[in-house]
Image (cartoon, helix red, strand yellow):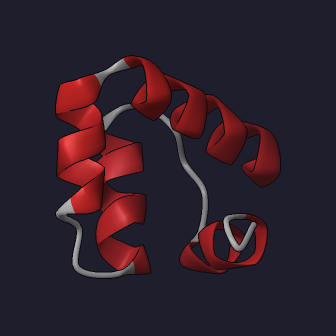
Amino acid sequence: MSKSQLNAFLAKVAADPALKARMDAAADADAVVALALSEGHPFSPATFTRFSRG
C-alpha cells in the first residue's frame, strides 16, 4: 500500500507545478512525507527513500 501511495503522490506532483515546487523545497524525507500526507497520500519516510532512489 505504501508504494502505491508514493506512486500516486509522485504522479500528482508531476502534474502540479506548485506541488512540485513545494516538494523540491522540502528539507528531507520527513518533510516530503508530511506534504504527501497533507495531500492524502500516507507513506513512510523509509518508503520514500527506498523507492525514490531511481
Vertical side of 13 occupied by 51: above or below: below
Q: Is residue 2 left or right of residue 19?
A: right
Image quadrant containing the N terminus: top right
Can you tell which quarter of the image residue 31 is in? bottom left
- Total marks placed: 0
Residue 27 is situated, as x and y percent measured from the top left of the image, at: 22, 79
Residue 3 is situated, as x and y percent measured from the top left of the image, at: 79, 50
Residue 30 is situated, as x and y percent measured from the top left of the image, at: 37, 77
Q: Is residue 24 left or right of residue 11?
A: left
Can you tell which quarter of the image residue 49 is in? bottom right
Vertical side of 19 occupied by 21: above or below: below
Q: Residue at x 19, y 45 (%)?
A: 21
Q: Residue at x 25, y 34 (%)?
A: 19
Q: Residue furthest top?
A: 15
Image quadrant containing the C terminus: bottom right
Q: Residue at x 29, y 53 (%)?
A: 23
Residue 41 is situated, as x and y percent measured from the top left of the image, at: 52, 38
Q: Is residue 3 left or right of residue 42?
A: right
Near-viewer residue (36 or 17): 17
Q: Residue at x 33, y 81 (%)?
A: 28
